[in-house]
Image (tube, helix red, strand yellow):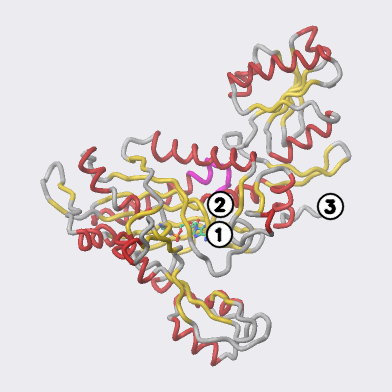
Amino acid sequence: MDTEVTMEKIVSLCKRRGFIFPGSELYGGIAGMWDYGPLGVDLKNNIRDLWWRTFVHERDDIYGLDSAILMRKNVWEASGHVGGFVDPIVEDMVTKKRYRADSLLEDNGVENADGMSADEMTECIKKKEIKSPEGNPLSDVRTFNLMFKTNVGATGGEDSVSYLRPETAQGIFVNYKNIIDVFYPSIPFGVAQIGKAFRNEISPRDFIFRLREMEQMEIEYFIKEREWEESFEYWRKEVMGFYEKVGIPAHLIYEHEIPKEGRAHYSKRTIDFEFKYPFGQKELSGLAYRTDYDLRKHQEHSGVSMEYTDKNTRDKFIPHVIEPSFGMERLVLAILTSAYREDEMDGEIRSYLALDTKISPVRVAVFPLLKNKPELVKKAGNVFSVLKKEVGRVRFDAHGNIGKRYRRQDEIGTPHCVTVDFDTLEDDTVTVRERDSGEQQRVSLNELPSLLVK
Ligand code: GAP
């Protein structure tokens, strides 16, 4: 049996079971956009809720925020995105297809191409006589701004220009002053935001890994400058703790220290948390020390002081920032990849998702043993109603034989299935089957909700 986890298996399961569909599929699809079906939405919502609970509700030093996606273009000028949020692009001189130059160089064995300037890449292409994947000559390398430009309002013109945000972080920086004025937080404190971000990636690829529309979950944690190293270490552990909480074992996450040339313009230190996806070990999330770069730039451009006054010493200073930044879709893909399993059960090959109970779209499925026995269907309906209230995320399924129903739930990662049979009518007990082992036990209906919650 070939149990290797491949992208084909993951993509096919996602489509077949209603997790993720290609965006605009009816009209041939659109690169870099994917739609979440009923199970994908629930998986994503559960991850989002767990993240928010962990980093906002269970702490008293992090404030939540939901800022607008469209902001004035001054925000993006101040942050450096208008001038510097670019990728190097190169064109096939014959087909006119465009490629990300650093990826193309790396595909041709050039190391650390992402640290090179456009001119250095052009020179390297010429020196090594690198051709396009179709074997044609390439243009010089130029830079391409990744932000989606739009106009706000009906008047048009330069003043109306805005951009879909390429990171949620800037919404936090432009609200930093509101947070300190309203809540008087003691430093260190953080602001967290979850929301959509958009990047006009040159070559979106690998399913939901490199997207043009994505969701980020970010924290800007404001600190005193001298505390940055200690805080960085603290957040490093917090990030790993969240991966374990969401069900990705620590040994599947690799830390990659990004050298100076590879870091974003605002960062003095960055660690990428990488995961071994079926297409290679790649960035899952990032942790950056953004210094006071963003607040200082916003102070310069807006003319508004970004200083924080220390409550004890009355010292005034611009806080520095540690930023843990998670990409929702890369997390979903890492979760699906690490949870995907194949084995043999009851003489059949089955695939299942060993999802953590906290995030599985369905927590428990309830079946009547036979769908044409009204007394069983009625009793199973009662069990369903009780579990809906006391456990939540319950599914009722009466279609097909019981083995098929188990397989369906296994494939979407449901941890437990409850079957109502003729004995249930006599003694109020049901069969509870556990997903990974397939083990079954008889449980009384009185104990069922508390057992499942435990
Ligand atoms: N605010 C910092 C920031 O945006 P980033 O490394 O560019 O840093 C943070 O992005 C995270 O967002 C990445 O680690 C990744 O999880 C996710 N991400 C970035 N670009 C993405 C893309 N094109 N498609 C999917 N996820 C992406």
The stretch drawn in magenta includes residue 272:
no
| Residue indicated by mark 2 | 329
Label 1 within 8 A of ligand 1 by Cβ: yes
| Residue indicated by mark 3 | 1
Q: For the view shown, which residue lies furthest in the right direction?
A: 347
Q: Amino acid at mark 1?
A: Leu
Q: Report the front residue among 33 and 28.
A: 28
The stretch drawn in magenta includes residue 243:
yes
Between the residue at mark 3 and the residue at mark 1, the CA separation in whole angstroms equals 33 Å
Residue at x-position 76% and y-position 24%: 367
Q: Earlier in the sequence, mark 2 or mark 3?
A: 3
Residue at x-position 54% and y-position 74%: 100
Q: Amino acid at mark 3?
A: Met
Q: For the view shown, which residue lies furthest in the top direction?
A: 426
Is 169 above or below relative to 427?
Answer: below
Q: Quadrant of residue 160?
A: bottom left
Q: Which residues are magenta?
A: 242-250
